[in-house]
Amino acid sequence: MDWRTTKFDWNRARAFLVTVEEGSLSAAARQLGMAQPTLGRQVAALEEELGVALFERVGRGLTLTPSGLELVDHVRAMGEAASRMSLAASGKVQSIEGTVSISASEVDAAFRLPKILGQLREIAPGVDVEIVATNTESDLRRREADIAIRNYRPTQPNLVARKIRDIDGRIYATPCYLESIGNPVTPEEFGAADFIGFNRTGEFIAAMTRFGLALTQRNFPIVSESHLVQWSHVRQGLGIGIITADIGDAEPAVVQVLPELDPILVPVWLVAHREVHTSRRVWLVFDLLARELARPYTPRSSGPA
């Protein structure tokens, strides 16, 4: 069936979408503030209008049918488009006020967020932002943050998650440091080099083997769990470290090491609590982050001197 040419009632479509996100008719009814029988009738009416079954009942739960799976992405896109249209309406964005908390790694918080938040200040000056700069996972269900930028697929249930893109991870060093160790050109020649890592456990060493580097704990004279500390030490010539290529290539003090090797792919996911669909300010920030994180990183201009 071509959903694009099928006309249906948006209220019914919204009832379907919230039921999918909540996992049951009872939870969806509570979310929408209506009686469960009313919600059930709206979903049933949508099924009748489309001429397909959208759910299969498994015990007390609901499972999407193939037709339901096909429809849900279209309905979600409609909801997102409706939210953007509402926010773009005259005066609406300017009237949005309140605080949104964003959990992000130290690198994302320090490098990627400033330019995006500069745009947010222009389009929605009433929205305040709290940045939770952490390399550990914030629990969105406990409201440790409203939105999270993560470099791995989310596993927590009942969250809205969108994969933005993959970014190349590369290794970098200053030209002076490379000169001090004889300007090696093959992975084998880096066997005695100093690396700046997260720790001296096998996890980081295993990551380096993807570049063909056979390292041991002796290669890590300096370690720090802080990504910003690692990057600062690399930039100051204390050793070799890893960072995403968009940020590394924008730093004039360093050069790529072994650029001919395949990169490590670093996924970028944007995650929010499911109420992102009902909070205008959270949706505004989520939508802006999704759009801008999909674009190549460029440093924020400091303006005219």
Image: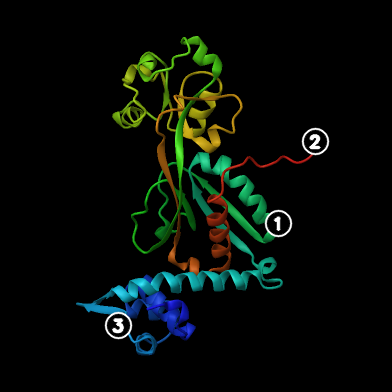
Task: For mark 1, give the secondary structure.
Answer: helix
Which three-letter amino acid code belongs to the residue tagged 1?
Glu
- Provide the residue designation for mark 1: 122
The residue closer to the viewer here, 244 or 110, is 244
For the residues labelled 1 and 2, the Cα–Cα distance comes to 21 Å
Mark 3 or mark 1, which is nearer the start of the sequence?
A: 3
Mark 2 or mark 1, which is nearer the start of the sequence?
A: 1
Q: In the rendered image, which quarter is residue 124 located in?
A: bottom right
**Percent x, y for residue 289?**
55, 55
Residue farthest toward the left in the current orientation of the protein: 59
- Provide the residue designation for mark 3: 53
The residue closer to the viewer here, 102 or 190, is 190
Image height check: is 303 above or below 201?
Answer: below
Image height check: is 28 above or below 114?
Answer: below
Which three-letter amino acid code belongs to the residue tagged 2?
Ala
- Quadrant of the snapshot with the C terminus: top right
Image height check: is 77 above or below 236?
Answer: below
Residue 95 in view, yes or no: yes
Residue farthest toward the right in the current orientation of the protein: 305
- Provide the residue designation for mark 2: 305
Numbered disc in front, either 2 or 3:
3
Question: Colour mode?
Answer: rainbow
